Image (cartoon, grey):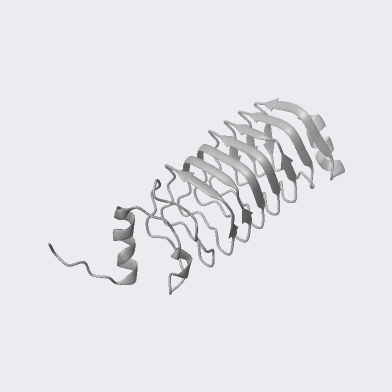
């Protein structure tokens, strides 16, 4: 841990081809460090500022992110497995070839980011913010997207039919929803946003 903190202090350093297990960092600043070929297992990051850092071929497994800042980060070919990161700040981040499995990203902020391709399975994104984001290819399975904020983020080409998708935050004309793929139950719920009344059988 001490060696890693020393690298953070130098700024713009490279950490590569290594693994950290049960590492605990609190209120440290990464100063644009690049992580390449790194595995983090069962680590706790409390108040860590990762902003501007690069993560390539990195795995986070069983990690906790508490009040962490990843604004402006680039994540490429990264995997998050069984991680808890409610409220994670990923504003203006770039996520490419990233996968999330069994993670909690409730209240996370991915606004103004470039997102995709990504895969998310069994991920909580309750009340997450994706305002003004540019979405690429997304594969979503068994995710909770309740009250997700997609204001000014087009969802054309996105399939949420295998997810929970309720009460999204959108523009007054609902333009974000154009081209979105939903299941019949979701379509019925979304019709209420449009003020559509269904006839009784």
**Position of residue 178 measured from the top left corner of the image (x, y, whole percent):** 45, 65
Relative to 199, residue 107 above or below: above
Tell me the residue at 57%/55% (across/down).
109
Asked if residue 16 lies left or right of residue 99, the reply is: right
Tell me the residue at 70%/27% (across/down).
20
Looking at this view, is 18 or 30 the one in front?
Answer: 18
State which quarter of the image contains the N terminus: top right
**Position of residue 196 measured from the top left corner of the image (x, y, whole percent):** 27, 70
State which quarter of the image contains the C terminus: bottom left
Tell me the residue at 29%/54% (across/down).
185
**Position of residue 188 measured from the top left corner of the image (x, y, whole percent):** 29, 60
**Position of residue 127 measured from the top left corner of the image (x, y, whole percent):** 46, 54
Asked if residue 60 lies left or right of residue 156, the reply is: right
* Residue found farthest to the bottom: 173
Looking at this view, is 68 or 122 the one in front?
Answer: 122
Residue 28 visible = no
Relative to 9, residue 81 above or below: above
Residue 153 visible = yes
* Residue found farthest to the left: 201
Looking at this view, is 46 or 107 the one in front?
Answer: 107
């Amino acid at each position: 841990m001490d060696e890693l903190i020393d690298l953070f202090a130098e700024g713009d350093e490279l950490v590569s081809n290594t693994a950290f297990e049960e590492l605990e960092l609190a209120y440290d600043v990464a100063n644009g460090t690049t992580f390449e070929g790194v595995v983090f297992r069962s680590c706790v990051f409390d108040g860590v500022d990762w902003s501007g850092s690069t993560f390539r071929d990195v795995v986070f497994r069983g990690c906790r992110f508490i009040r962490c800042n990843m604004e402006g980060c680039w994540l490429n070919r990264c995997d998050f497995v069984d991680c808890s990161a409610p409220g994670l700040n990923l504003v203006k981040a770039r996520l490419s070839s990233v996968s999330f499995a069994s993670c909690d990203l409730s209240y996370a902020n991915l606004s103004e980011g470039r997102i995709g391709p990504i895969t998310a399975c069994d991920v909580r994104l309750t009340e997450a913010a994706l305002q003004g984001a540019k979405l690429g290819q997304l594969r979503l399975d068994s995710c909770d997207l309740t009250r997700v904020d997609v204001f000014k983020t087009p969802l054309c080409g996105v399939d949420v039919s295998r997810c929970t998708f309720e009460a999204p935050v959108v523009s007054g004309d609902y333009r974000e929803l154009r081209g979105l793929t939903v299941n019949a139950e979701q379509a019925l719920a979304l019709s209420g946003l449009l003020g559509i009344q269904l006839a009784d059988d």
